[in-house]
Image (tube, rainbow, N blue to C red):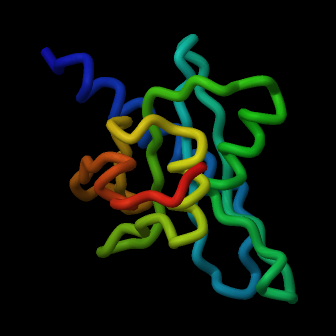
Amino acid sequence: MLNQKQQDADELVKAARNAAKAAYCPYSNYPVGAALRLRDGRIVTGCNIENASYGLCNCAERTAIFKAVSEGGRAFTALAVCGGKERPAYPCGACRQVIAEFCPSDMPVYIAPLEGGDIAATTVAELLPLTFSL
């Protein structure tokens, strides 16, 4: 039987992979999905959304966090990000800063490719050490 942490990782990775199917990425052809678990157990997902003006694109992680916050969510317990094939997609610098703004530093972050492969586990603090905050 899987332990609770592994079950949570598997469930979030599955939700993130499913979210990637909704990605709007006609320029990069690189879909990414994210799944964020709220303390109350709900899962909020997001995908990357591109624009011809690249500066106006939004990553899957930020889409999920902004969506959760806009719906009143403020307490998060885990995040999964899925993208890439052989090598999974890790959050960019902007996403790492947003994750650090809204998530506890010891919160687990699971990273996995879109199909199969191992699930890497890290934390918010490991993704962005020496975080800028007020």
Q: Nearer the viewer, residue 29 or 98?
A: 98
Residue in the image at 55% along x and 36% along y: 36
Q: Tell me: 82 left or right of 8.
A: right
Q: Tell me: 120 left or right of 55.
A: left
Q: Tell me: 102 left or right of 8.
A: right
Residue 97, quarter of the rendered image: bottom right
Residue 28 percent across, percent down from the top left = 65, 85
Q: Is residue 73 above or below residue 95?
A: above
Residue in the image at 57% along x and 54% along y: 33
Residue in the image at 44% along x and 58% along y: 131
Residue 64, quarter of the rendered image: top right
- Please identify the residue farthest to the top as the structure is shown: 40
Residue 21 percent across, percent down from the top left = 64, 55
Residue 125 percent across, percent down from the top left = 34, 50
Q: Is residue 32 above or below residue 69?
A: below
Q: Nearer the viewer, residue 50 or 74?
A: 74
- Please identify the residue farthest to the left as the structure is shown: 1
Quick one: quadrant of the N terminus? Answer: top left
- Report the number of discs: 0
Q: Tell me: 92 left or right of 109.
A: right
Residue in the image at 82% along x and 27% along y: 71
Residue 78 percent across, percent down from the top left = 43, 33
Q: Is residue 69 above or below residue 75?
A: below
